[in-house]
Image (tube, coloured by chain):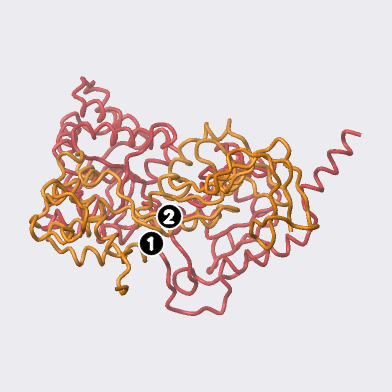
Amino acid sequence: MAAQLGGKVSCTLGEVKNRADLVVYWGCNPAECHPRHLSRYTIAQKGRFLPRGRKDRTVVVVDVRETKTTNAADVFLQIRPTRDFEVLTALRAVVKGQPVDAQRIAETGVTVEQLQDVADRMKRARFGVIFFGMGLTMTRGKHMNSMAVLTLATELNAFTKFVAMPMRGHGNVTGADVVMRWTTSYPFAVNFSRGYPRYNPGEFSSVDLLVRGDVDAALILGADPGATMPMPAIDQLARIPTVVLDPKVTHTSRLARVHITTAVTGISAPGTSYRMDEVPLTLRPPLRSPYPTDEQVIRRIHQAVARKPDWLDASRGSRATAQA
Amino acid sequence: MLRITGGRVYDPAHGINGVIQDLCIADGRVVADVVGGRTIDATGLVIFPGGVDVHTHVAGGSVNFARGMTPEDHRRAAAFVRTQSHRSGIGGMTPTTFATGYLYAGMGWTTVNEAAVPILFAKHTHEELRDIPIVDKCSMILMANNEILLDLLEAGELERARHLVAWQIWASKAYGVKAVNPGGVVSWKWGKTAVNCPRRSRATTTSHPARSFPGWPASWMTWDFRIRCICTAITWAHRAMSRPRSRP
């Protein structure tokens, strides 16, 4: 969503692995949330142009608290909660050599000297990358924070090579995003009720639809909103017929009317998963499962729905009646 | 059997330039005449062979990124409403896959070639092409900035480079090779342009097997001119593959 405001400079994780001599983590904790990320792509990994691995990389972490990731960092900026946008804006000014107010920067929990140090490291880097997580994108400021971090990366390209990438979670969320874009032209929050895709985050996003009580049924695939959504949305999911496809018992499956157990994609079901840099990966399952795959279940539901009369004809009929 | 009457026929391959005449089709082929069957009145319309768009960008990582970035364009673009026969979609600068098929077919195109596929995104591109209805699709793989290929060229390993080109075409299920901004993207990965490409070939002019190609100007054999070097090598590899081998 932030890319819609100011564009995005990105790359693949292979480029990060082979080139990034400065890695910034902002509002994320990959050591615990993306456990293979640090070892495969950044800290522990030797790259083609970084033959000494960790010794060739500088790691900067910006977070509101100490985590396993901050322990592994060369530089840790501990900022006050909800001050990400201010710090990012000040950092953009410092990078460009503009005057900043030390008093107001102090309110964010860091000092001008710390920002100057990070800005210098960023400009000195041969290839810099900023990974940003939900600590940035889902706190006060939300997509405006993401826009600020993407803009910082864009502006740093006046000095050196710099990219920014969101740390996405929840399995194949990138894949859902990618498929929605090619089928509807929008990444999420798409409404088909008029027979064509319409997009309006805040109006058609699932949390908003549930909280307002606009939906009277829900089909949930590969997600656990019962664990992550705000309470009013969860209450609505419990109230309406909710169908969950999931290999495991989750918070959502417990409150659902129907829980269909499916095979685990990648372990006992084949498919394609999109990595967070949008590179598609083929999944070849090593095991078999007694359960059907998500695709098989959805196809069978679709076949059953297709036998029903077409809703467009039905809606045309009612419209004609209304006009009469 | 089909008869299309009253249309203005353009068929450059047969020298027909805007003649109003009937067109008859039987068993999928154009024939002189048919008796009976269906008739379409094309009075006031143009009849021409299905267009082949050899260079388009309708699918893949870059197009899909653009889709996500331009919701304001999609809001004002033509919406494709779902019907019994059509899937829904959005037109505009970067139409959705189904809309792309309907738009191309509406303009008289029957084949489109997605002309820039990085190998890492080939699978994604094919998934999108599969969702483009009506028209035939193919794609070309980008190779002028492929790190593995450039490594082989730097080392002067031309035979292996040729095998790599062949393997990449096979692996990406591409129709051919495309060279865009040779050496430039490699440089861009350090924030630089093709002029200061960090790559330099060690192969010498004399060891260049493309010398054996008849009709190639000697000036093309200067390997140290990097952009031309990459293009020459790819073209050589590609030609060496498509050349008939076993014929006398």
Question: Where residue A99 sits: x, y (%)?
Answer: 20, 19
Res. A142 visible in picture: no
Secondary element type, mark 2: strand
Residue located beneath label 2 in the image: B139
- Tell me if label 2 and label 1 are in contact, CB under 8 Å: yes
Asked whether A71 or A173 is in front, the reply is: A173
| Marked residue chain, label 2 | B
Query: Are labels 2 and 1 assigned to the same chain?
Result: yes
Asked whether A150 or A144 is in front, the reply is: A150
- Chain in orange? B
Question: Where residue B246 sits: x, y (%)?
Answer: 31, 74
Q: In the image, what residue type sits under mark 1?
A: Ser
Query: Residue A257, located in which quarter of the rendered image?
Result: bottom right
Asked whether B158 or A12 is in front, the reply is: B158
**Left or right: B32 as drawn, with respect to B50:** right
- In the figure, what tint was chain A given? red
**Left or right: A207 as drawn, with respect to B116:** right
Asked whether A154 or B7 is in front, the reply is: B7
Residue located beneath label 1 in the image: B172
Q: Residue at x 44, y 69 (%)?
A: A266
The N terminus of chain B, quarter of image: bottom right
Q: In the image, what residue type sits under mark 2?
A: Ser
Mark 1 is surrounded, within 10 Å at the Cα level, by few (under 14), some (14 to 19) or many (20 or more) other residues, namely many
In this rendering, is residue B31 above or below A146? below
